[in-house]
Image: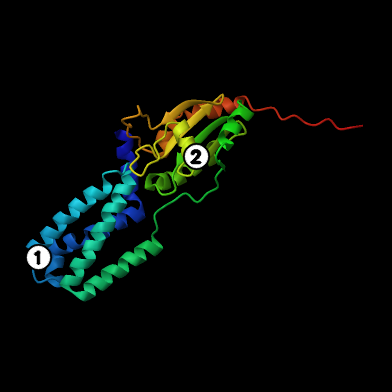
Amino acid sequence: MFDELIFGTKTLLSPHHATNIFLASSYILLKTIPIVCSYLFFDCSLELQEWEWITFLGCVIVLKTKKLTYFVDYINTACLFTKMLNTVMFFKANPLYGTVFGGLCILHFIFIPEPTYQGPEYITYFRASHLDEELEKDKRIIWVVTFYAAWSPPCVTFASIFSQISNEYHLDNLKFAKMDISKYPAVAEKYKIDCSSWSRQLPTVILFENGKDKIRRPLTNGKQTAKFMWTKENVIREFDLNQYYGDCKKHPIPKYREKKEN
């Protein structure tokens, strides 16, 4: 819970999300602050119809976010639908207000984009049986593999985090990989990962040691899946990456040199 609070606070304080939240709450703020409202509107209180729209908005947000696991996704989805309603209400009050608000939303999207990792990554992308071949090829290598689906919002959100981790922790004997299991249902079945559209197991990350499934998140018993917060800190801690990185660095895979012929 504490990690989720820290992660949520950092997210809210980023320029993109702080501005996004301000835009989403702008209509209610402008309509209820007397000093501002008196210059922009005839009435400094929300009308009955506006309250009905806001109530309907709340229902839409609940329905659209009930399957989400990421705090960022909650914020983005709620702000998106709220800004859509704000545009309607601003236009209703004054077409000029609606035009200005729509322009601000476009400028926000262009000039203050959502922060993502832009650095290098060290990720192998597996297909079909390639993973099993690599696991059997050299069991000295520890693999951390993300099983994902390209259409899954949580997987998209986690992608940049996994890339950053791969950049910081990759070694010759500690490698990172990904596989789109929506394309390979047989692989999903083998590793007992539900890749349906309503699945709460996407993404699933498995650490393979000696070719065997050693650690996986999220945990599931086949019927229920435990909620897992896919932050960088959580992944590093739950998969004990600092310990594995240290051990792998102390015991590197020997590089044999070919003997030169005389």
Q: Residue at x 14, y 54 (%)?
A: 55
Choose the circle earlier in sequence order: 2 or 1.
1
Query: 180 or 205, which is in the foreground?
Result: 180
Crowd rating for badge 2 (residues with CA inside 10 Å; few <14, some 14–19, many 20+):
some
Residue 97 percent coordinates (x, y): 22, 72
Q: Would residue 33 be seen by someone viewing this image from the given angle?
A: no
Badges 2 and 1: C-beta atoms under 8 Å apart? no
- Which amino acid lies under the numbered mark 1 shown in the image of this protein? Cys
Q: What residue sits 35% from the left and 35% below the top?
A: 228
Q: Is residue 144 visible?
A: yes
Give, as a three-letter code, the residue at label 2. Ile
SS of the residue under disc 1: loop
Which label number is shown at residue 44?
1
Please give the label number shown on residue 60.
none
Identity of the residue drawn at 33% across and 47% down: 72
Whether 36 is drawn above or below 159: the answer is below
Which residue is more in the foreground, 198 or 59? 198
- Residue, far front: 186
The residue singled out by tag 2 in the image is 165
Give how far across and how far down residue 51 sits, in percent.
Answer: 11, 58
Q: Relative to 127, does residue 192 appear above or below in the rendering? A: above
What x and y, as percent, mark residue 212?
A: 52, 25
Q: Residues within 10 Å of mark 1 (few under 14, many from 20)?
A: some
Give residue 233's quadrant in the image.
top left
- Closer to us: mark 2 or mark 1? 2
